[in-house]
Amino acid sequence: MKLVAITSCPTGIAHTYMAAESLEKTAKEKGIDIKVETQGSVGVENELTLEDIQKAHAVIIAAGTTVSRERFEGKPILEVAVSEAIKNPGNIIDQALKLEAGKQNLSKQVEEIKKQRSEERSGPYKHLMAGVSFMLPLVVAGGLAIALSFIFGIEAFQQEGTLAAALMQIGGGAAFALMVPVLAGYIAYSIAERPGLAPGLIGGMIASQTGAGFLGGIIAGFIAGYTADFLKRTIKLPRTFEGLKPVLILPLISSLVVGLLMIYVIGAPVKGIMDAMTAWLQSLTGTNALLLGTILGAMMAFDMGGPVNKAAYTFAVGLLGANVFEPQAAVMAAGMTPPLGLALATVLFKNKFTKAEVEAGKAAWVLGISFITEGAIPFAAADPFRVIPSIMAGSAVAGALSMTLGATLRAPHGGIFVLPIPNAVGNLFGYMVAIAIGTIVTAFLVGFLKKKVNEV
């Protein structure tokens, strides 16, 4: 028996590779031959060949983004959330093996699983995360380029012809200018595939030009995608003219629809909302800042890379283009705290963990400093009722302190590795204090709540 699989998470950083490793390890234990293609942040790795697919009994797609199924035509396909492949790889492999070869429809068991998956995860949520995954590299590169330009002085970029000006042009003038169009374009691409890309990019660019920002880009992406998808399914042409559809008819009509709606109907109201939200966020102090940081922090730890975590993260990333940097700092601090706190707990309270968990704690240090919240998943899966409240409390404290102390962050990823870059982090000392205290709170709560491993 041979299986092939694809794993892909929205950011393409942690879940993608953890799911692949989980499937490969479990398949080896079961004596099943499996090849897993990862569609991560660096692109496709371990790509499935035509021969691999032809020999496969079934296909497993464990993804939080849209994955093309065209090359698997005629093969039974089991689609699951990427987190399921991490938590229940054995169950997923068993389900895939039960699928009858050659069947295009899924078995009753698989249909039940698909019904259980929320509409948010399989529909709009997945499309939004597809857009975010393509936008992220632009935000990271742009934010760090801007931070590097400030090495020469906060206003040094205003002097034309200088290196500071060039870095600002790369970061602010190019990377950040593309952020919203790429977000909208790939939301639309996720919905309608290639016909959605052009109207999505155009709608996103208009959102940027009208000041509607990332919120307008999200709306434009969904309008473009669903419009292109509707037109693709409803417009029927003679075979001789069918070639005009993807290159002329669909891009033109869908671009006009989304463009006119953004200019005359949606742009101005959404700009007003964005301006009001930006002004409110920039004025946050005291109790309000603490409350927002607490909420964002708790969300980051709640499902450790799941939809709630990604909602908080997307909110913070979107605000970078509006020059609001405090929520991003709170979100990254809160995302680092769960694995760091659990790693510390395995050192301070070894009698509360199994030998395997103590070993996992060593890896959790590395995952934590790299801002990979998913490093907490093995501990949470083993003891969710004690671990999840503990990591949520620690992350809430980290987020609240980060916001209250006015820490800012220009790069949406990288963990401690972006901290040494001059001007990437505002109030660096306060930011490190927030992470440290959040980590300690998590560790001591876990140590207090968990039972000794020899207790029943």
Image (cartoon, grey):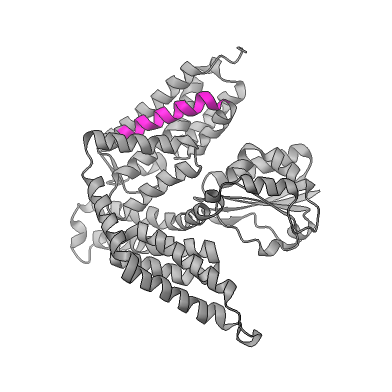
Q: Position of residue 230 (x, y in %)?
A: 54, 70
Q: Identify the image quadrant of residue 452.
A: top right
Query: Does the rendering let one see residue 3?
Result: yes
Query: Does the rendering let one see residue 432?
Result: no
Q: Position of residue 89 (x, y in %)?
A: 67, 40
Q: Nearer the viewer, residue 291 or 38?
A: 291
Taking the spot 56% from the left edge, 24% from the top edge, the residue there is 358
Name the side, left or right, on which 97 lies relative to 280: right
- Count how many numbered circles sit on residues in the image: 0
Residue lying at the far top of the rendered structure:
455
Q: Nearer the viewer, residue 56 or 268?
A: 268
Q: Nearer the viewer, residue 264 or 433?
A: 264
Q: Identify the image quadrant of residue 292.
A: top left
Magenta-highlighted residues: 383-400
Taking the spot 46% from the left edge, 67% from the top edge, the residue there is 224
Prevailing secondary structure of the magenta residues: helix
Q: Position of residue 315 (x, y in %)?
A: 38, 48
Taking the spot 41% from the left edge, 45% from the top edge, the residue there is 313
Name the side, left or right, on which 103 lies relative to 161: right
Q: Is residue 305 magenta?
A: no
Q: Compared with residue 130, is residue 354 higher up or lower down, i.e. above or below? A: above
Name the side, left or right, on which 182 lies relative to 47: left
Q: Is residue 386 magenta?
A: yes
